[in-house]
Structures are given as C-alpha cells and as structure tokens.
Image (cartoon, rainbow, N blue to C red):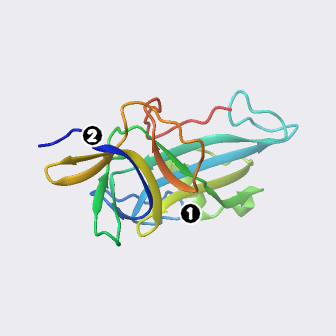
Amino acid sequence: MDTTPMMMKNVVLEVVTCGSIPLETSFQRIPRCVYASTELHEYKGWVGKSAHPRHRCFSWGCRHSEKYVGDFYISDFQTGLRALVKAGYGAKVAPFVKPTTIVDITSNKELSPNFLRCLADRSLSSDDRVMRLKEGYIKEGRTVSVMGVVRRQDNVLMIVPPAEPISTGCQWARCLLPSSNLRRRSHIGCRV
C-alpha cells in the first residue's frame, strides 16, 4: 500500500462523476451533484429585521448558508485516467462556485410552496421580509479544476488536499481548492 505523495497536481477541466454519496440541491432539487450550496439573504432598509447583528441598513445580509461537498471522481477521456478526489468526510477544501439567484421575494404573497418548504426544513420564518435565495452546485458531467496532492492507495489514484495551505493567486468559476485552515461544517453561518 503506497500512500506517499507523488506530486502537486492541477487537473484542469476534467469531467466529474459522483462518488458513493451523490448530493441534491435544497431548493431546485437538482440530483447527482458533487457540491451543493444554498444561501438565504435578506435586504434591510431603514426599518426591518436584521439578518445578523452587524447587518447595516440598505444592504443584503446572509441569514442562512449551507455548503456540502462529497468525494467524487474526475476522468480524463484523452488518457483514460480516473482519479478519486477526496473532498468529503472531513477533508478541508475551499470550493469556488458562484451561486446564482434562484428566487427574489418582495412580499409574502409571492412565496411558493417549494420556497416555504425550504424555509420550514431549516426552521426559518418569512416574516414579511425581502429575501433572495441563491444556489450553487457542480452537477455530474460538468468539468472542474482540482488542485491537490496525487497519491496511489490500493491501485486507486487519489487527489487529496495537501498538508499545508497553498496560494493560487486566482479563482476559477468552478474549482475545489485544498485549504488546511477551513473548518468543515454542514451549516456555515455568514458573518459580515
């Protein structure tokens, strides 16, 4: 069993396939994702409730945020190589996926049953607030860039986060980067 690191690897634009546990987005219910995030933002004018204690007037504040990532495979169709990317189960990674706005709510009359279910599942209330729901995801079949250390264990090629943080100097649209100082939580609260 060889578990020694082989080299730092930047695998660019490789096709993603799900590992043993595929994910599903919270609001749109998009299946077979390797990464899924949901953010609920609230707008505060002169009056109204704050999303968090330091929420300023005339700005959007993050009320709830959750991010999930699981182990997945990347495949290079030119060479035929397939590698397991260890991104779930406590691995420290920093995903760079820009979420898109799914729903803008300006009054309680616009609340769909699906949106109300999403709020209820997280024990959140609507309370006549101006809200914006954003989701980000990487679906199976998409291409991603991954940086990490290449290892071989029991004839399985793996890309794992390095022991030390690395600086990349840039951000990609869909990228999972290793980060040794990022605490992994299933629910990450936004603080501005």
Classify residue 176 as left or right of residue 61.
left
Query: Is residue 75 placed above or below 185 in the rendered structure?
Result: below
Residue situated in front as seen by the camera: 30 or 2: 2
The residue pinned by badge 2 equals 5
Determine the CA span between mark 1 and mark 2.
Answer: 46 Å
Report the mark closest to the observer, 1 or 2.
Answer: 2
Contact, mark 1 vs mark 2 (Cβ under 8 Å): no
117 horizontally vs 102: left or right: left
Corner quadrant of residue 155? bottom left
Label 1 crowd (10 A; few <14 / some 14-19 / many >=20) = few
Q: Is residue 74 above or below residue 93?
A: below
**Image point (48%, 39%), residue name:** 187
Per the image, the residue denoted by label 1 is 114
Q: Earlier in the sequence, mark 1 or mark 2?
A: 2
Extreme residue in the bottom direction: 78
Extreme left residue here?
A: 1
Residue 93 visible in the shown view: yes
Asked which secondary structure carries label 2, the reply is loop
Amino acid type at circle 1 is: Asn
Q: Is residue 152 above or below residue 103?
A: above
Query: Disc 2 residue type?
Result: Pro
In front of the other: 181 or 110: 181
Farthest-out residue, right: 46
The secondary element bearing badge 1 is classed as helix
Residue 37 percent location from the top left of the image: 52, 51
Q: Position of residue 165 (x, y in %)?
A: 45, 32
Number of numbered markers = 2
